[in-house]
Amino acid sequence: MWSEFVSAEMLDQRVWPRAAAVAERLWSTADVDDVGDMYRRLDATSRRLELEGLEHRSGPRRMLARLAHDRPLPPLEAFGHLPEAFRIVQVADQAGVDFVKTSTGFAPSGATHDDLRLMRANTSPHVQVKAAGGVRTLDALLDVMNLGVTRIGATATEAMILDFRARKAGLAPATTATAETGGY
């Protein structure tokens, strides 16, 4: 399993839902393609996992409580149920979060400039914005920083650092396989 950060508290919510979804696809025949029915079956599996003691549903609530700094949780709990991205970041801001980030793994692409502009425009100045996915070069990093991003999630960090050092020394940008093939 790969993730930007996984603590013991987050392990259940990172591993088990994904493992169940993969198993669902592998165990199903090719003609099984009813997404709604898949979610129904995954929900049943999730309930069984909870009965076995996994905390993939209850763990996030404890983490939200910490993010909200002991403020009421309903605004943060509504976070995943709102259709408009700008409302999501506004709700997160009102709940008192320290940062918001773009989604990886569930979206067709990494952070877009439009997403980042929207997030920056709809949060208070103290809320940091993280671009997760899509930032694979030093130029891309500088571009998103100019949009107000203060954090990134990237697998091409080494290539960006080498490029920065080369530019600072007045040399041609350094290239590595990571920079050429991208991160996510």
Image (cartoon, rainbow, N blue to C red):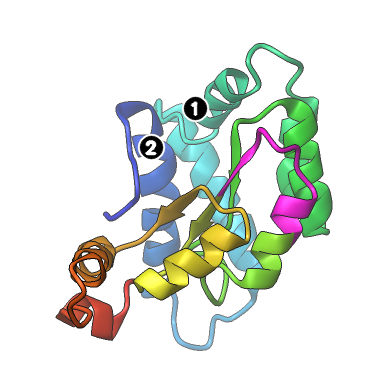
Q: Is residue 88 magenta?
A: no
- Percent position of residue 47, x then y: 54, 38
- Indicate the quadrant where residue 93 lies: top right
**Quarter holding the N terminus?**
bottom left
Mark 2, residue position: 12
Segment colored magenta: 118-129
| Callouts 1 and 2 close, C-beta under 8 Å | yes
- Percent position of residue 52, x then y: 39, 29
Mark 1, residue position: 59
Q: Which residue appears farthest toward the top when viewing the image?
A: 70
Q: Amino acid under label 1?
A: Gly
**Quarter holding the C terminus?**
bottom left
Q: CA distance from mark 1 to mark 2?
A: 8 Å
Q: Which of disc 2 and disc 1 is earlier in sequence?
A: 2
Disc 1 secondary structure class: helix
Q: Amino acid under label 2?
A: Asp
